[in-house]
Structure formats: C-alpha cells, structure tokens
Amino acid sequence: MPSRQRPVAHPRRLAVLALCALFAVSGCTAFGRAVKEGDELTAQHKWAAAEAAYQRALAADPEASEVTVKLRAVHKDWSAEVYQEAERVHGTGDLPAAQKLLVRALQLDSENGDAHALLARTLDARVEVAQKALKDERLQEARAEFDAVLAVSPDHVAARKGVEAVQVAWAKRWFKTGQQLEESGKLGNALLSYVRADQEKVGVTAARERAEAVRQKLRDEVAFLVVATPVEDKAQSPDVAQRLGAGRLAAMLPTELPIRVVTEAPGSKVGVKLDLTLERVLPIKAVEQGQRTQRYLAGNRSVPNPKRRQYEDKLLQSERTLEEVERKQAAALRDYLRRQAELNTVRQTAERCRERERKTCLDLIQRCGEAASELQKPGQVPEECNPAACATRQCGQEEQLLVTNAAVVQQLEKQLDTALEQSESQRREVQRGRDLVFREPVTVDEPMYSDFVYDVELHRLTVKATVTSVVRDLLADKAAPAPVTQDFDVMHEDSSNKGYDRYGVLADPVQLRSELELRVDAGDKAMEDIAKRVMERFDAYRQQRLEEARLGMVRPGAEDVVETAVRVLLLTADKPPADILQPMARARGLQRPEALFGK
C-alpha cells in the first residue's frame, strides 16, 4: 500500500515557533543569570546589588517562590547588619544617626525585635535630650527633637507632652518679649509678639487681651480725627440739624478703620475739621392735574366667524383636490376601456385562428383515415397520417399579442381601482368639510371696548435741605476755608382719583409720606455725602503712609520697618496690602496674618 506522507509545516508557523522558543530561552537565561548574580552578591554581603539582582529575576518570573525566599533572607541579613551599625552608632551617642539606621533596619525587616527595642530606647533618649534642652530654654532644639520622635512614633506620649510644653514655653517667651517691647514704646513689634504668643498656645498667657489693648493704642495713635463742631442751625430746624451731628457721622464711617469723630481738636493730630451750617429746610408741595384712561367693555358686535372662514378655505381646497382626483380617475377609466376593447378584438382574432387550425387538423385526420383504409398491406402508415402536419403553430403571433394585452389590461385595472379608492376618500373628505361649514355659524359676537378718560391729581412733597460744609486740615488750620453749599432733595409723590364703578376705576386716596419723615431723610442724605468726602480725605492720608511703608519692605523683619508697617496695616484694615502683610508675617512667623486685626 502507498506510504502515508508526513504533513509539511507551514514556513510561517515554523518561524513563529522558533521565535517563541528563542524568547523562552532568553527569558530563562536572564532569570538564571540574575539568580546566580544575586547569590554571588549575597555571599559578598553586597546587599543592595543582591536585592537589585533578585528583583530582576522576579521581573522575569514573578511566580518564582525560591527567589522570593532568597530576597526575604537578604533583607533579614541586611537588617541585622544595619542593626549592628546602629547599635555601634548608638553607643557613640549620635542618637539621630542611630534612629535613621534603626528605621532603615525595620524597613528591611519589620520583625527585627532587637531593632524595635533599640529604637524605643533611642526615642526615649531623644525625648530626654529634648526635655533637657527645654529646661535650658533651647526651645528650637527641643522642638526639633520632639518632632523627630513624633515623625517615627506619632503616639509617643512623652513627645506629645513635650511639644505642648514647648508651645507653652514659646507662648510665654513671646509674651514676655511683647511686654518688654511695650514698655520700651515699640507698640508695633509688641503687637506682633502678642499675636505670635496667642497663636503658639491659646489661653496660656494674657496675650490676646494685651494684643487688643496695644492694638487700640496704635489705632488711637494713627487715628484720623474728624473734629465735628456743633451744627449752626440757621433754618431753625432742630430735627434736620440733629441728623447732621457727630454721632450720625461716626455711624456712617467704617468701624474697622481708625477714624475718630470728636468735638474738640487735640494738638498735632492728623485729620480734618468739619463745620456744618444748615442754611434752610424748604418743604415744597405741588399738585398737578392729569388724566388717565381705563379700557372698559362697551358692548358686543357681530363679526364674520373666522373659524367658518378657515373651514370654507379648507373645503375649497378639498373640492379642488377632488376635481383633480376625478380627472385622473376618468383618464384611467378611458385607458382601461380602450385597452379592454383592444383585448376583446385580439381575443376574437386568436379564437378564429384556433378554429382554423382545428378544422385543418380535422381534415388531415379524415384524409389519413381514408388513406389507411385503402392500404393493402397491414403495418404501413400512409403519408397523409404525418403528425407534424397538425403540430404547426400558425397562431403564435396572435397568442403572444393576446398575453401582452391581457397583462396591460390587468395593470390598468389595478390603477383604476386605486383611482376609485382615492376618489371615494376625497369625496368623503369633501363631505366632512361641508358638514363643518354648515355647522359653524356665519357670524359671532365680539366684545367691543372703549376708553374712559378720568381726572387724576398728582401730589408731590419735596423737602430741600441746603447745607454749607467747610472741611479744613487740622495741621493747616490757617489755610483759607473753601465752603461748599449743596442742596439735598428728598421727594415723594402719589396720585389720587375718584372712583367710577361703572368703568372699573377704584377710588385712590392720597397717601404721601409725612413731612417729618422726608426732613429726616434729607438730613441723612446730606450726611452720606459729607461722610463720602471725609473718606476721600482719609484715603489720601493713608495712601501717603502706605507709600512710605513700602520703601522699607526690603527689610520686613527690622523693628523700625515693623513699627511703620503695623501702623499702615491698621490704616488699611478694610483692604490690607498683601505686599506688606505677607512678608512681615513670614518674617515674624505668624501662621494667620489676619489675627493682627483682631479677626
């Protein structure tokens, strides 16, 4: 039997298998080489290089458990070696270096009990060092030691208590510094010291109370005075003059700014002197006659029904569409009848042709019978009995024409049926439109409106207060005054009319505000304008002080610069400039600079 042929592998498949085998061999080679290198480095106690080699082996084969065991052993031996070095360093007294080594040893082997015990002793020793530094008033060193301990052991009780003790010590130190600065007259630096003491530890000292007292002294020192003299009432209107008093002016100025409204001017103070004179208060009443219109329903009128008009338009469109459909139906019927007549003619022609063929075939059959009866020899077929003579199709053309005409007539019949259905549907649509038109009335009633004109009285009450103000600089009192006289009007108006129930107009009586209320509002309006002018003077004053303070911000921590900057910041408490506040706060270690303003 023939030998079976071996299946021949496809060349591309062989290349893929070879490439996979090459990758597998190269992977195994890389894995074995990395493991071997790691073993050699472990024997040489080169722990970091050995760890890297084992990591490469695991990258090649993550499921290699023996490499994991070797890597864990390297970490354990490495941790033991680091622990020995830490123990040696601890013996020399270098506690920070010993702590770093012990932390590294525990990172390598978290189950190293000796490292845990030595780390605990190291942390306790650092706490003792910090407590000793705290007793010696070396607060920064003590805080650094406590923070180093808490970085490793956040729950260390002694270290946490030590941090609180350092904060208390800092608070007391800053408070003491603030007292010394306050006694020496450096109120700006004293305020920063008190704020820093309060931020270090709240409630340990009276820093917050002292800061408020010093802040008040500084505000009084840099205060912008507004000397408001008694109002001269020439209009004999005490109610309006009262609204122009010093108390009302102080209420309208910002409370967070050091602006003081006083009645007597102290010497050598920055500010303005305000003299007010109430010239007159004039109430003006006016009544204006006018007219308004009110639309009312006068009756109804008959108008053509717009809805019927819409129905009629729709009916007309439907009738035109019906005419078009009936025209198409008539054309389809004519085509159908014409084709039907042609089909009948073709059918008659085909039937006559079939009849001729049948008669011809019968004659041939008769002659065949006669010829067969005359033959003498049985078994012979006469020539007259040839079947092909009857098989000739002389009516093929008529039959084909009949089939074609029948198909055309059938298609025209379908088109005629479709036209009849469309005509019937459109006829129903026209009938429905006629019903809608007949049911809708020809006219409808529409409301008829008219305008009723009635008289209206407009009552207007205006109070005009004339105030003359003179604003002088306190430091330039001899300058020529520049009086400013202004009129401040407050107006209220209301309309009134009689009632006309027939036309839907309700009676509206006069409801004007009283003259006393408008007089008070006129005084307040005048005081608002005066307060705005005082703020303009204050803004010019503090802008000058602000420019002077910015010149010294190259040394934000200097005492003289701080004195100037703190005073300027109190002048700009509503919008403190960041280019002064932030550098000074960083120089003095303030965590919340806004506490400088008592916030």
Image: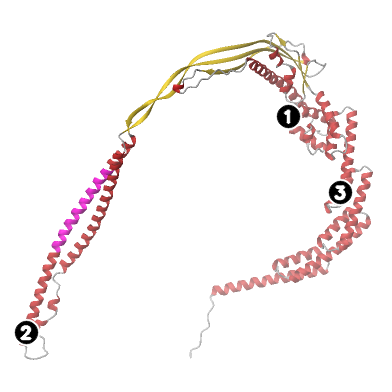
Q: Is residue 54 left or right of residue 347?
A: right
Tell me which label, 1 or 2, sits earlier in the chain.
2
Q: Nearer the viewer, residue 460 or 469?
A: 460
Q: Residue at x 82, y 27 (%)?
A: 216
> Is label 1 in contact with label 2 (beta carbons under 8 Å)?
no
Tag in front: 3 or 2: 3
Q: Nearer the viewer, residue 143 or 419?
A: 419
Q: Tell me where residue 207 sits by quadrant.
A: top right
Question: What's the residue type where badge 2 is placed?
Answer: Ala
Q: Residues within 10 Å of mark 3 (few under 14, many from 20)?
A: some
Q: Residue at x 26, y 43 (%)?
A: 319
Residue 560 visible in rendering:
no
Residue 370 among magenta residues:
no
Q: Tell me where residue 527 sits by quadrant.
A: top right
Question: What's the residue type where badge 1 is placed?
Answer: Asp
> Of helix, strand and loop, which one carries label 2?
helix
3D distance between C-alphas at marks 1 and 3? 39 Å
Query: What span is colored magenta in the figure?
Result: 318-346
Tell me which label, 3 or 2, sits earlier in the chain.
3
Q: Position of residue 484 (x, y in %)?
A: 67, 12
Tell me which label, 1 or 3, sits earlier in the chain.
3
Report which residue position mark 2 lands on: 371
> Of helix, strand and loop, which one carries label 3?
helix
Report which residue position mark 3 lands on: 160
Q: Position of residue 130 (x, y in %)?
A: 91, 48
* Magenta: main secondary structure: helix
Report which residue position mark 1 lands on: 574
Question: What's the residue type where badge 3 is placed?
Answer: Arg
> Is label 3 in contact with label 2 (beta carbons under 8 Å)?
no
Q: Is residue 280 above or below residue 318?
A: above
Q: Is residue 477 left or right of residue 361?
A: right
